[in-house]
């Protein structure tokens, strides 16, 4: 019998490119995606809620999660830890649901090692100038942290070739339409492969 596992989608890209904005818009639409809420040691921003935006942890708590192998991936990004809870992702995929991660590039590369069958989407800014404007105008980071994030952005953009898809986030609705098309086409592709595989098995058994 063919296993009907969900698909793991990974949306990644430099800080401020619009990953959160695109993901929130995508989740407003009708679909069967489950969002994996990450763990982080960074401070809560105004309006953010524990268990909704992130699970907020102390460094000690986070390091314990690492030791206990409870994270599918984790990374230190501009002086804070960020990581994906392993149990939620594995159980949700096994139950046949698609899981959506929104994570930075180092973490995405770790996921790629363990889940090469995942679908890796890189969100690309219209320009570096626009990327800077978006981080600055969001107004959530100090000037020093903005500089740290922009420095990371250059390294992150160099990793773009490791992704299956690149989507330019010029307008949010265009980017969401493209991500939705990627999700649908991956389902069609995998359904087709599953059917071919099933037919091969049936032919062999008959
Ligand atoms: N297509 C777009 N056009 C203009 N502004 C945008 C667009 N997409 C996102 N933004 C704005 O850019 C800022 C950064 O977006 P967002 O917080 O979603 O980025 P992010 O990639 O999730 O950042 P981080 O990685 O730092 O969490 C926000 O103020 C958001 O409203
Ligand atoms: N490797 C991981 N990166 C993650 C995870 N959750 C979020 N992120 C990324 O971290 C940066 C900074 O996020 P912010 O909320 O402080 O702006 C951003 O690129 C996020 O996508 C995770 O679980 N693992």
Image (cartoon, grey):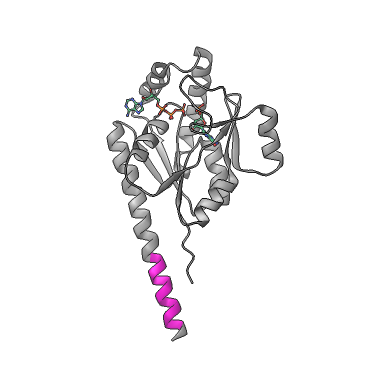
**Residue at x 36%, y 65% (from the top left corner):** 192
- The residue closer to the viewer here, 45 or 121, is 45
Q: Residue furthest top?
A: 143
| Corner quadrant of residue 199 | bottom left
**Residue at x 48%, y 22% (from the top left corner):** 150
Magenta-highlighted residues: 193-204
- Asked if the magenta segment contains residue 69, the reply would be no
**Residue at x 50%, y 41% (from the top left corner):** 36
Looking at the rendering, the quadrant in which ligand 1 lies is top left
**Residue at x 49%, y 13% (from the top left corner):** 143
Q: Position of residue 76 (x, y in %)?
A: 60, 30
Q: Position of residue 78 (x, y in %)?
A: 57, 24
- The residue closer to the viewer here, 92 or 119, is 92
Can residue 133 be seen in the rendering of this structure? yes
Dominant secondary structure (helix, strand or loop) of the stretch shown in magenta: helix
User: In the image, 154: left or right of 25?
Assistant: right
Q: Position of residue 80 (x, y in %)?
A: 60, 26
Q: Position of residue 90 (x, y in %)?
A: 56, 51
């Amino acid at each position: 019998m063919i296993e009907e596992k969900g698909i793991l989608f990974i949306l990644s890209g430099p800080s401020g490119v619009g990953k959160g904005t695109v993901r929130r818009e995508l989740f407003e639409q009708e679909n069967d995606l489950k969002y994996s809420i990450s763990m982080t040691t960074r401070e809560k921003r105004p309006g953010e809620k524990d268990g909704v935006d992130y699970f907020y942890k102390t460094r000690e708590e986070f390091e314990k999660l690492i030791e206990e192998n409870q994270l599918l991936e984790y990374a230190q990004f501009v002086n804070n830890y960020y990581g994906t809870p392993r149990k939620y992702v594995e159980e949700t995929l096994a139950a046949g649901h698609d899981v959506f991660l929104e994570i930075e590039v180092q973490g995405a590369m770790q996921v790629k090692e363990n889940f090469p069958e995942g679908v890796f989407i890189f969100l690309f800014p219209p320009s570096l100038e626009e990327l800077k404007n978006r981080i600055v105008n969001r107004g959530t980071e100090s000037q020093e942290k903005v500089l740290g994030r922009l420095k990371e952005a250059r390294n992150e953009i160099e990793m773009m070739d490791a992704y299956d898809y690149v989507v330019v986030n010029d307008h949010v609705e265009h980017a969401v339409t493209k991500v939705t098309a990627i999700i649908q086409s991956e389902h069609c592709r995998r359904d087709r492969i599953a059917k071919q595989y099933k037919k091969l098995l049936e032919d062999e058994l008959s």
